[in-house]
Amino acid sequence: MAKERTFVMIKPDAVQRGLVGEIIKRIESAGLKIVAMKFIKPSLEQAKKHYAIHEGKSFYDKLITFITSGPAVPMVVEGENAINRVRQLMGKTNPLDADVGTIRADLAMDIGRNLIHGADSLENAKYEIGIYFTEEELVDWEWILEQWIYE
Ligand code: IDP
Ligand code: MG
């Protein structure tokens, strides 16, 4: 096991629907440590960098319009296998394919309104963190509850 940092973004649909607290609650309750968080309207430049790997795909233009349409909550979270842990909490991309108990299955209806982004690899996590946060914005703090989360 390895402690990792991953990039998460609570998307504009979740903000509009008042689900920010619910989603953060699931992340916190799982035992992940928040090391950075912001409430911002992603710029076109940020969105294009973030979703560069999807450029040219059929859903790309709508995705960029959606992500830049309203406030979102980018976050950096840390924990053992944080990348896979967050992907597990999110569920599959299409809410219809996601397992019950995941954020997308429990709270979403549509692949284009699936509430949350989570990086899918260490390399992409580093890249995405760099789009939304400076090194100084990653908060170094001691979480005393950690001894009750990890053996
Ligand atoms: P992920 O968010 O589960 O990692 P990706 O394949 O990386 O899924 O796609 C990025 C985002 O693009 C998805 O979360 C979703 O919002 C959107 N998206 C992906 N595929 C489709 C599609 O077929 N139609 C509409 N939107 C899509
Ligand atoms: Mg992805």
Image (cartoon, rainbow, N blue to C red):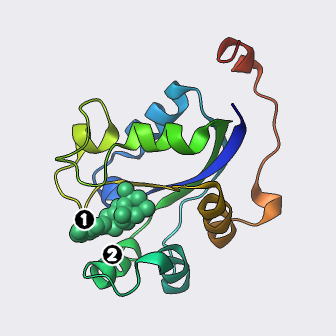
Q: Are marks 2 and 1 in contact (CB under 8 Å)?
A: yes
Residue drawn 29% across and 29% down?
101
Residue drawn 27% across and 52% down?
17
Q: Identify the amino acid type marked 1.
A: Gly
Mark 1, ligand 1, within 8 Å: the answer is yes
Q: In which quarter of the view is residue 26 placed?
A: top left
Question: Relative to 16, is 136 on the left or the right?
Answer: right
The residue indicated by pointer 1 is: 112
Q: Is residue 131 above or below residue 91?
A: below
Disc 2 crowd rating (10 Å Cα; few below 14, some 14-19, many 20+) is some
Q: Which disc is residue 82 wearing?
A: none
**Nearest the camera: 3 or 113?**
3
- Mark-to-mark CA distance, 2 and 1: 7 Å
Disc 1 crowd rating (10 Å Cα; few below 14, some 14-19, many 20+) is some
Residue 137 % position (x, y): 76, 58
Mark 2, ligand 1, within 8 Å: the answer is yes
Residue 9 % position (x, y): 49, 57
Residue 119 % position (x, y): 53, 56
Does residue 78 appear in the picture of this structure? yes
Residue drawn 81% across and 37% down?
141
Q: Identify the amino acid type marked 2.
A: Leu
Question: Relative to 83, is 15 on the left or the right?
Answer: left
The tag earlier along the polypeptide, 2 or 1, is 2
**Nearest the camera: 25 or 122?**
122
Does residue 12 appear in the picture of this structure? no
The residue indicated by pointer 2 is: 63
